[in-house]
């Protein structure tokens, strides 16, 4: 795709839930290089809400009319992961660049099918935490070897709330959502762990999953990550029932570094029992809000005039899918 200087990328959106209404649409509508040509959903209330709130062309998806959606430069697929099969069949026939909202897939077979089907397409998945300034700095420090090898990664996220702040949504339907807190929230921290360690797989050592109506709402995991420069212990604790705070901590041979889960969170270093003032760590300029982090991802998918798209290899999403599927498989035996 070649964009003329001054021209706008055309974007379409399939699935108009909270993440689109609260994040993607505000971001896209405030970008000078993008024109949102249409949004579409199977639920009329979602279509009506997008139309009234943002005054965009909103289309009700009915049987057989997917092929009638106008061609655009890029499409955001934000329908629940368990309801994407028919959309994938249609979108792979188009030349559009594709932004998949996380999670990437429910199973390893589904993930590999997506990678294969979209071969030749430009494809990105919504793991925006990879682009937070503190995580980028954390990756630089990890690669430098200044603190020695990574020994353990700890992911903790949890509070007594629904992910969207709503009393009920698609996350209460396991078949559509693909899972609960592990699939919806835990995938972020697990993805970062694989990105940081360059591990290719993980062996589960211990796990505990609490289900409520088929939805996992509290998860504890200890696993061994392998395939990277060294073996790394991964500990994950997630809950929609307990207050856990939000933390991504990396323990090295000679210290530990940890950040929160928001773009503006600082990187805190502990070395030999002394804490380095986080302001002493110079972070590269980057997103300061979730909206800016999402916009940064759109800039990767839709680069400036004359610049090639620099999207990550989609096979990099597969280890996270594999581990999450293994946790669910073990828990449901």
Image (tube, rainbow, N blue to C red):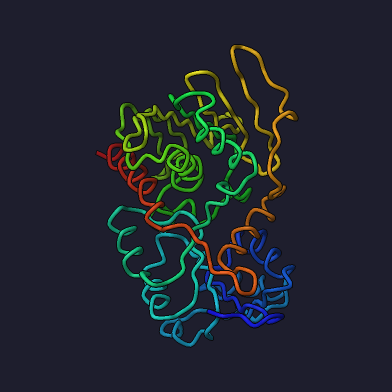
Q: Toward which corner of the image does residue 72 lie, by quadrant?
A: bottom right
**Figure check: 219 above or below 120:** above
Residue 214 position, x and y percent, is 38, 45
**Can you tell which quarter of the image residue 269 is in?**
top right
Q: Which residue is depicted at the point 42% across and 82% down?
A: 63
Say which quarter of the image contains residue 176: bottom left
Residue at image position (75%, 30%) is: 279
Q: Nearer the viewer, residue 157 or 269?
A: 269
Q: How many marks?
A: 0
- Quarter containing the C terminus: top left
Left or right, residue 86 beside residue 77: left
Whole-percent x, y for residue 170 in the image = 50, 56
In the rendered view, does 236 fall on the left or right side of 117? right
Viewer-proximal residue, 125 or 80? 125
Residue at the outermost top position: 273
Of residues 25 and 304, the one nearer the viewer is: 304
Q: Residue at x 69, y 49 (%)?
A: 286
Query: Would residue 232 appear left or right of 2 to someone viewing this image?
Result: left
Is residue 43 positioned above or below 225 on the image? below
Q: Position of residue 323 (x, y in %)?
A: 34, 42
Residue at 59% across, 29% down: 258
In this view, 190 is above or below 305? above
């Amino acid at each position: 795709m070649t964009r003329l200087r001054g021209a706008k990328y055309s974007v379409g959106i399939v699935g108009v839930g909270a993440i689109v209404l609260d994040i993607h649409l505000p971001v896209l509508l405030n970008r000078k290089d993008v024109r949102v040509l249409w949004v579409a959903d199977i639920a009329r209330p979602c279509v009506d809400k997008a139309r009234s709130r943002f005054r965009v062309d909103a289309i009700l998806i009915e049987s057989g009319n997917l092929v009638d959606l106008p061609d655009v430069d890029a499409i955001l697929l934000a329908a629940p992961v368990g309801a994407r099969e028919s959309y994938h069949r249609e979108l792979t026939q188009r030349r559009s660049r594709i932004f998949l909202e996380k999670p990437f897939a429910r199973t390893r077979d589904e993930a590999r099918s997506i990678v294969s089907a979209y071969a030749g397409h430009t494809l990105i998945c919504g793991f925006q935490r990879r682009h937070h300034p503190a995580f980028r700095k954390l990756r630089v420090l990890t690669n430098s070897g200044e603190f020695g090898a990574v020994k353990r990664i700890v992911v903790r996220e949890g509070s007594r709330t629904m992910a969207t702040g709503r009393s009920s949504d698609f996350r209460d339907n396991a078949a559509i959502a693909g899972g609960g807190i592990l699939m919806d929230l835990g995938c972020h921290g697990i993805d970062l762990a694989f990105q940081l360690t360059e591990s290719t797989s993980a062996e589960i050592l211990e796990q505990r999953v609490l289900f409520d109506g088929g939805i996992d709402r509290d998860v504890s995991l200890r696993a061994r990550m392998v395939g990277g420069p060294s073996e790394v212990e991964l500990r994950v604790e997630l809950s929609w029932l307990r207050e856990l705070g939000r933390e991504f901590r990396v323990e090295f041979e000679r210290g530990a570094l940890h950040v929160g889960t928001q773009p503006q969170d600082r990187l805190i270093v502990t070395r030999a029992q002394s804490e380095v003032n986080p302001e002493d760590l110079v972070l590269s300029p980057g997103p300061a809000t979730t909206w800016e982090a999402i916009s940064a991802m759109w800039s990767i998918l839709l680069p400036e005039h004359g610049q090639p798209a620099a999207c990550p290899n989609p096979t990099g999403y597969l280890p996270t899918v594999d581990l999450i599927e293994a946790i669910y498989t073990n828990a449901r035996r």
